[in-house]
């Protein structure tokens, strides 16, 4: 692919390092601004020490169509505090004050980016320290208005593939992809089903016939055991809804945050890391 980001991005360096160590990455997802800015930033800053290799940070949106109830509610909690893209970027910038190596990927929907302005978004995201972007509802055929600006700012555009992506469709998706490929292991929305190890193994093998990019698998991974099993067949295991569920349990009906919320999240991430980091022989 022409005009792709250089091979010196944080994502590329992290993936090469882990491949050399013979293990997959643990990618942890949670919503920016959930349950509030300060708690969200506190969790983010501690994730690398807990074992997260890559951080995927959600951008709140009022109509997250690919997400199940858990992440929909996390968007609502963040939006109650009027969290916007600018606030998510501010959190990344604050994170970069103390952590310069861990890749950060933003995940969300195109409507807020469109209103922000694609060029302005790419420039501001790069300045904050973002390494890549996943836009759930932006197909590759319509992505050029964003990807041209991401590439100009040395950021990756990461595309989703699914069990329903045919051999004819995959080359169209992969032509525009960089950083890694995100394989959605289930049909349906996040947090509503469990990934099937054998199906993932076969799907990853099929993807490897089409691309040399690292392959991450997400949707349907909720436990350290599942993360270990799925991680044995791919380059990265993504856990999101299970983390978001723990955040939700730490917020009462009035929005008050339990003082142990961050601790509970980080203890769970440590258990995920212990599973994923033992995934490859």
Image: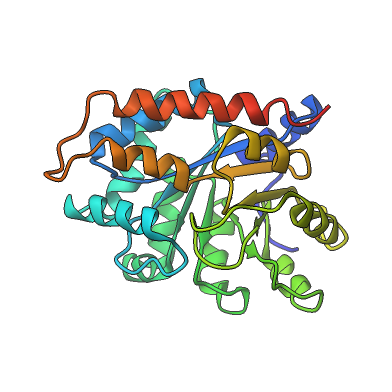
Q: Is residue 258 left or right of residue 223?
A: left
**Residue occupying image coordinates x 25% and y 57%:** 76
Figure quadrant of residue 53: top right
Is residue 171 something one can see in this rendering?
yes
**Residue occupying image coordinates x 88% and y 60%:** 209
Q: Is residue 149 left or right of residue 116?
A: right
Q: Name the foreground residue: 145 vs 64.
A: 64
Figure quadrant of residue 182: bottom right
Q: Position of residue 275 (x, y in %)?
A: 64, 28
The relative height of residue 184 versus residue 237 in the rendered view (above or below) is below
The relative height of residue 255 versus residue 220 in the rendered view (above or below) is above
Image quarter (top left, top right, bottom left or bottom right) of the N terminus: bottom right
Is residue 9 something one can see in this rendering?
no
Q: Position of residue 9 (x, y in %)?
A: 63, 41
Give the farthest residue toward the right: 209
Q: Position of residue 8 (x, y in %)?
A: 68, 39
**Residue occupying image coordinates x 30% and y 29%:** 261
Q: Is residue 29 left or right of residue 93?
A: right
Image quarter (top left, top right, bottom left or bottom right) of the C terminus: top right
Figure quadrant of residue 17: top right
Q: Position of residue 115 (x, y in %)?
A: 32, 70
**Residue occupying image coordinates x 72% and y 25%:** 278
Q: Name the foreground residue: 274 vs 58.
A: 274
Color style of the picture:
rainbow
Q: How many marks?
A: 0
Q: Name the foreground residue: 68 vs 213.
A: 68
Give the farthest residue toward the top: 49
């Amino acid at each position: 692919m022409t005009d792709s980001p250089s091979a010196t991005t944080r994502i590329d360096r992290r993936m090469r390092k882990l491949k050399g160590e013979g293990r997959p990455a643990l990618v942890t997802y949670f919503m920016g601004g959930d349950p509030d800015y300060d708690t969200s930033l506190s969790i983010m800053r501690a994730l690398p020490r807990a074992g997260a290799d890559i951080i995927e940070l959600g951008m709140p949106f009022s109509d997250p169509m690919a997400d199940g109830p858990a992440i929909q509610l996390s968007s609502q909690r963040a939006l109650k505090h009027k969290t916007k893209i600018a606030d998510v970027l501010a959190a990344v910038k604050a994170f970069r004050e103390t952590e310069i190596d861990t890749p950060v990927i933003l995940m969300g929907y195109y409507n807020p980016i469109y209103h922000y302005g694609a060029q302005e978004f790419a420039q501001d995201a790069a300045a904050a320290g973002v390494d890549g972007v996943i836009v759930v509802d932006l197909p590759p055929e319509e992505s050029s208005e964003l990807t041209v600006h991401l590439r100009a700012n040395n950021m990756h555009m990461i595309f989703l593939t699914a069990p329903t992506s045919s051999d004819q469709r995959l080359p169209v998706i992969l032509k525009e992809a960089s950083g890694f490929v995100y394989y959605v292991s289930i049909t349906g929305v996040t947090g509503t089903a469990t990934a099937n190890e054998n199906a993932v193994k076969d799907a990853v093998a099929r993807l490897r016939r089409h691309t040399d990019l690292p392959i991450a698998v997400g949707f349907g991974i909720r436990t350290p055991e599942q993360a270990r099993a799925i991680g044995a067949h791919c380059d990265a295991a993504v856990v999101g809804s299970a983390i978001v569920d723990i955040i939700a349990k730490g917020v009462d009906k009035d929005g008050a945050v339990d003082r142990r919320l961050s601790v509970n999240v980080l203890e769970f991430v440590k258990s995920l890391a212990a599973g994923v980091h033992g995934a490859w022989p």
